[in-house]
Image: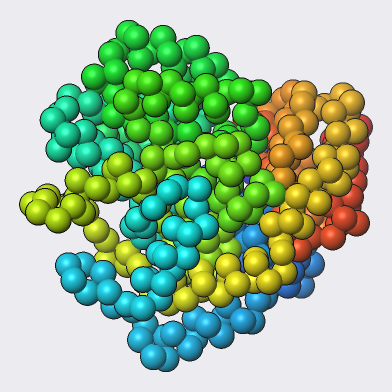
Amino acid sequence: MPAVTARGDDTGRPSDQVPKQRETTLWHSQAHMPTVKRAERVIVRGEGAWVFTEDGQRLLDAPATLWHCNVGHGRVEIADAVAAQMRTLETYTTFQEYANRPAIELAERVADLAPVANAKVFFTSGGSDAVDLAGKLARRYWDVQGFPDKRVIVTRSNGYHGLHALGTSIAGIEPNRLGYGTLVAETERVAMHDAGVLEALVRERGADQIAAFYCEPIIGTGGVYPPAPGYLEAVQRICRESEILFVVDEVITGFGRTGAMFASDRFGLEPDIMLVAKGITSGYMPLGAAVIAERVWEPFWADGSDLIFRHGITYAGHASACAAAMANIDVLEREQLVDRVKSLEPVLDAAFRPLESHPLVREVRSGVGLLAGVELHELELLPRVCARCVENGVIARMLSNATIQVSPPFVVEPAEIEQIAAVIGEALDWVAAG
Ligand SMILES: Cc1ncc(COP(=O)(O)O)c(C=O)c1O
């Protein structure tokens, strides 16, 4: 069903002709509730790169729900792994000395896969939790090293690091930050593509004030921006030279999205803390993690240390979520889905590039893995373009800066990638024709 506005819906029907649902009780995330409250689009089933609505529409899932369904929908073996774990033990806490076997095994597996030497893994319930954890750990690390003033957390314009208190305070997408006052103090933002600006900030504010620099290797929700050539290498060098922890937020890019297991592999990064979520379970269960380099964990783990990192959440290392992650990584590896992303990268690029010449399009950003952003000149046109795509069988998700997100499940077929591009192209023509 198209999005409904006060004036009618995005197909141009007047509001009195738009079929109305009963008002929902569910408060949707990042939603204009007056528009959505009687116009929910309810997804009831999924299969590979496709999902089905309650009223029977079959939709190609171009955004992989919220960038997370890497292995595709309807994986019975992941469901079975979770069910088997739940029948035995739903979970057990990882507070103090307690643990559960799936959490221990997954920590080892993630540490082995990650481009972080000799890593330790702290689990969370999702990405925003991991963002919080990294901020606390970075500040605490410097505190115990004898630098209690190293507190500032720096992020990039257009950066998105979830919407908890820290993620909100460090948001590079302005509307996500406005109106909440100072949730977490001592934050700074720098321009997203210019390493020189970070260098200047470090000079001005002083390296002795800055705890960490958070960086998405590819800016996702802020508009799908691959890094400018040399940018990531440069900011990594600045962090190293200035003793600033380099926090690489791989919540979107982790577990194959860029055609490497992690974007850090692809771009030669060595994070001090790497954040993952989404693709770790492909969304079959909620889970996130911070993958922590030896330098950072060592003060808290060394024999004889009396330090405790005072952090933890009830579901850190939830056994059933960890079982889902193990089964999900089994699928990724067995079906060589990360290599598949690499081989589909030029297919996606070739399918979307031609849209750049469309008069409504400002820029197409693609060429790294199964990720593309189609930016329009006018934000106002975006809802109609996306609504038209859904009518024609493709979910097109709007990002804040007039960009359509394309990030399909890794099992998507080349013909389906072309279908996504064609449907978006037709929607652009339709809107342009007025
Ligand atoms: C780069 C990045 N970091 C953090 C998050 C927050 O993750 P979650 O929504 O699981 O809390 C997201 C979510 O989209 C993200 O894209």
206 or 45, which is in the foreground? Answer: 206
Q: Quadrant of the N terminus?
A: bottom right
Q: Residue at x 54, y 70 (%)?
A: 284
Q: Is residue 184 left or right of residue 112?
A: left
Whether residue 277 is visible here, answered yes or no, is yes
Q: Is residue 23 above or below residue 418?
A: below
Residue placed farthest to the bottom in the image? 87
x 19%, y 46%: residue: 299
The answer to which image quadrant residue 211 occupies is: top left
Provide residue 220's location: percent of width, then percent of height: 59, 39
Up the image or down, 83 lies above or below 172; here it is below
> At 50% across and 48% down in the image, what residue appears?
115
Between 191 and 425, the one nearer to me in the picture: 191
Q: Residue at x 34, y 27 (%)?
A: 244
Q: Which colouring convention does the figure follow? A: rainbow
x, y (%) of residue 305? 11, 51
Q: Quadrant of residue 100?
A: bottom left
